[in-house]
Image (tube, helix red, strand yellow):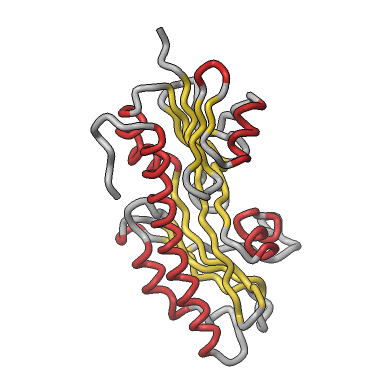
């Protein structure tokens, strides 16, 4: 993952973010392909069908990716397929365990999780966050997911987690190099990373003009010297404000 250290522009920062995101989605798509190959080679699909994916999941971890794997809806044995591991350091990796018993106090309803439900409902990849990931990292997180199909049926997701802290560390030189007040935000105007204490992770930009420009997905100049630069076709944008006088 390269870092930008020289003076840069907001559009260049947006391109840099888009490249990092697409690189992560490429890794996730590789897990999707492995999962679909495992489904195609299996007989009845059970919770153990995904076990052969473990080496591929572990290979995906590292760099920005702190958690990765494949999670499905309950299969023929009544359990979800779950091959998800956490930890960039191979010596400290742990496997995710989910309580899928609806009668349990710690039950995790996957269909209430946008990173799981949106790809199942739309059949398209999805970027969730920033949100506090209470299931895995208990940190502000971005989760990248792609639907997994068994035949023609969408049965689950392949995904990867990137903590906002790790992404912010990678982007910090580029954020500073823009030379303006700058924030990376999602399509709802929620801040992922910013260059000042005014725009901390999780805070919301409430200016309706900025919100409309982000949703429109085109570079725009707004009143008061504000500029919005989309990160390619992703649901992300770089917003800049004039430097204080």
Res. 110 image quadrant: bottom right
Residue 79 position in % (x across, y down): 64, 75
Residue at screen point 45% across, 70% down: 31
Res. 89 image quadrant: bottom left
33 displayed left or right of 206: left
Residue at screen point 52% across, 52% down: 143
Where does the C terminus fall, quadrant-wise?
top left
Residue 5 position in % (x across, y down): 25, 34
Residue 234 position in % (x across, y down): 52, 49
- Residue 239 against residue 134 in the figure, above or below: above
- Residue 134 against residue 183 in the figure, above or below: below
Residue situated furthest top in the rendering = 245
Residue at screen point 31% across, 61% down: 90
- Name the one closer to the observer, 211 or 151: 211
- Name the one closer to the observer, 234 or 115: 234
- Residue 234 against residue 97 in the figure, above or below: above
- Residue 43 against residue 191 in the figure, above or below: below
- Name the one closer to the observer, 200 or 83: 200
- Name the one closer to the observer, 212 or 104: 212
């Amino acid at each position: 993952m390269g870092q930008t250290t020289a003076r840069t522009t907001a559009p260049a920062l947006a391109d840099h973010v888009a490249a990092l995101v697409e690189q992560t989605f490429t890794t996730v798509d590789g897990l999707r392909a492995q999962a679909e190959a495992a489904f195609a080679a299996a007989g009845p699909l059970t919770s153990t069908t995904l076990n052969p994916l473990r080496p591929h999941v572990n290979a995906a971890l590292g760099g920005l990716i702190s958690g990765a794997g494949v999670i499905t809806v309950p299969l023929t044995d009544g359990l979800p397929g779950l091959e998800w591991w956490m930890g960039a350091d191979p010596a400290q990796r742990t496997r995710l365990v989910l309580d899928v018993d609806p009668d349990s106090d710690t039950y995790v309803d996957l269909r209430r999780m946008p990173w799981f439900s949106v790809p199942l409902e739309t059949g398209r990849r999805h970027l969730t966050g920033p949100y506090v990931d209470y299931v895995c990292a208990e940190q502000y997180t971005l989760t990248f997911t792609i639907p997994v199909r068994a035949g023609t049926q969408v049965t689950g997701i392949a995904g990867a987690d990137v903590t906002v802290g790790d992404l912010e560390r990678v982007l910090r030189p580029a954020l500073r190099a823009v030379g303006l007040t700058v924030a990376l935000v999602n399509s709802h105007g929620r801040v992922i990373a910013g260059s000042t204490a005014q725009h901390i992770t999780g805070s919301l930009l409430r200016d309706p003009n900025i919100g409309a420009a982000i949703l429109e997905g085109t570079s725009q100049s707004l009143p008061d010297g504000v500029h919005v630069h989309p990160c390619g076709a992703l649901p992300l944008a770089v917003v800049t404000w004039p430097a204080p006088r």
